Amino acid sequence: MKLLAELLRYPGVPQAWHDPELGTVLVPVVPVSFRKAEHAFHFFSTVTTLGTPQDVAAQEIRIECFFPVDASTTRAAQWLAATAEPRRD
């Protein structure tokens, strides 16, 4: 606590930092939200890259995956996938 008190004494520290809202849960991701009709979808994403590829073409591969943030997004995404018509390309 002494370290925190010392850091809060530095000039320019926002006043809101002195009395943090401890009831608010912070997540270590940036959520992304979409809306389709009446359904709201809340996801976070991860991006995977290949570290040391043996093929120069593989060096450019980026794979982005979206994961539901909450149970309602999981249910809504499952409903949307089940009711979607197959694509005809």
Image (cartoon, rainbow, N blue to C red):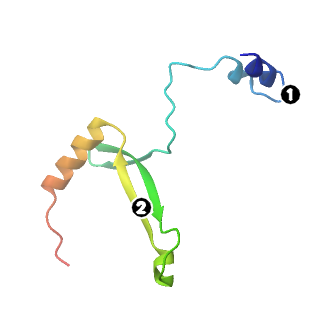
Query: Mark 2 or mark 1, which is nearer to you?
Result: 2
Q: Nearer the viewer, residue 54 or 1?
A: 54
Q: Amino acid at mark 1?
A: Pro
Q: Position of residue 50 (x, y in %)?
A: 48, 69
Q: Residue at x 82, y 30 (%)?
A: 12
Residue 11 shows which numbered tag? 1
Q: Characterize the local packing of mark 1: few (<14), some (14-19) or many (20 or more) Cα atoms within 10 angstroms.
A: few
Q: Nearer the viewer, residue 74 or 56?
A: 56
Q: Determine whether label 2 and label 1 are within 8 Å by CB.
A: no
Residue 64 shows which numbered tag? 2
Side (left or right) of 56 relative to 68 = right
Q: Position of residue 2 (x, y in %)?
A: 76, 16
Instruction: Give the image quarter of residue 64.
Output: bottom left
Q: Residue at x 49, y 76 (%)?
A: 53
Instruction: Give the image quarter of residue 88.
Output: bottom left
Q: Amino acid at mark 2?
A: Glu
Considering only vertical position in the picture, is 61 above or below 31?
below
Q: Earlier in the sequence, mark 2 or mark 1?
A: 1
Instruction: Name the quadrant of the C terminus.
Output: bottom left
Residue reaching furthest to the right: 11
Alpha carbon of mark 2 to alpha carbon of mark 1: how far? Answer: 40 Å
Residue 45 shows which numbered tag? none
